[in-house]
Image (spheres, rainbow, N blue to C red):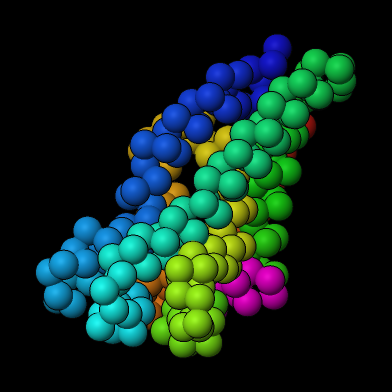
């Protein structure tokens, strides 16, 4: 009966494994990984979003370590989100068997996740975080402090990661509704986040996507209530 949740019972383990496998690709889509991989090849291969940081630390002998700390801070936030999503998934699977109504109407959880993600696309918090995530130049200049460079580099990546997770967490939760740890869905969701962040018109995608998610929630609810 628990399968009526629309979420594979093994999804938490699958999602963690899948997340670990594609985390480098997600970082690349956000403009982080190319900086580390090409740190010794000059600026031609570095994503424009982080070229400013590379320029700031280029004269330093610990440049590569600073870049690595920046990326580590960023990925730590995403790893933390993955753990939180795993705990949420485990909590839901522990709670559902205790509720006869949810056992019979597991689709409601999927509909609520879709509706919540859709509503979040219209929120001020979404746009605040998205603006910070889309403009790392100003973020780097504002938050980079030289007296404690290693700590500052890590904090810079961590803080920027918080904003990027802040604008994308609701979309990432959709993996439990439609993805079930599937690499294709995970990469698809990553592509949506990358477009929102990197394309000049990316912020215009948020509201149409929110409308589509709300419509999907209504369809899921309608199909189950009136079937």
Name the quadrant containing residue 88.
top right
Position of 164 relative to 3 (above/below): below
Q: Nearer the viewer, residue 223 or 169?
A: 169
Q: Is residue 87 left or right of residue 57?
A: right
Main SS, magenta region, reads helix
Q: Is residue 158 left or right of residue 3?
A: left
Name the quadrant containing residue 130.
bottom right
Position of 137 relative to 183 (above/below): below
Q: Which residues are magenta?
A: 124-131
Position of 142 relative to 84 (above/below): below
Residue depicted at x 69% and y 27%:
90
Q: Residue 193 appears at what percent x and percent y?
A: 45, 60
Does 201 appear in magenta?
no
Q: Residue 100 appears at what percent x and percent y?
A: 86, 17
Residue depicted at x 71% and y 52%:
116
Residue 212 in view in this figure: no
Residue depicted at x 58% and y 63%:
162
Q: Residue 112 appears at what percent x and percent y?
A: 73, 43
Residue 59 in view in this figure: yes
Q: Is residue 125 left or right of residue 69?
A: right
Q: Nearer the viewer, residue 36 or 223?
A: 36
State which quarter of the image contains the C terminus.
Answer: top right
């Amino acid at each position: 009966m628990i399968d009526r949740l629309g979420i594979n019972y093994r999804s938490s383990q699958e999602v963690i494994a899948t997340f670990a496998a594609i985390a480098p690709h997600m970082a690349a889509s956000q403009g982080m990984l190319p900086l580390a991989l090409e740190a010794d090849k000059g600026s031609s291969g570095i994503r424009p979003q982080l070229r400013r940081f590379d320029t700031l630390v280029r004269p330093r002998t610990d440049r590569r370590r600073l870049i690595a700390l920046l990326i580590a801070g960023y990925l730590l936030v995403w790893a933390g989100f993955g753990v939180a999503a795993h705990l949420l998934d485990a909590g839901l699977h522990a709670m559902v068997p205790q509720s006869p109504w949810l056992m019979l109407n597991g689709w409601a959880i999927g509909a609520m996740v879709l509706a919540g993600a859709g509503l979040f696309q219209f929120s001020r918090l979404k746009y605040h975080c998205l603006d910070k995530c889309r403009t790392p130049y100003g973020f780097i200049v504002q938050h980079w402090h030289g007296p404690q460079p290693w700590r500052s580099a890590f904090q810079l990546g961590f803080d920027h990661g918080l904003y990027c997770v802040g604008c994308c967490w609701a979309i990432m939760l959709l993996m439990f509704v439609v993805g079930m740890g599937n690499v294709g869905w995970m990469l698809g969701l990553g592509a949506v986040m990358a477009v929102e962040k990197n394309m000049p018109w990316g912020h215009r995608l948020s509201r149409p996507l929110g409308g589509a998610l709300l419509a999907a929630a209504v369809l899921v609810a309608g199909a189950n209530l009136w079937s």
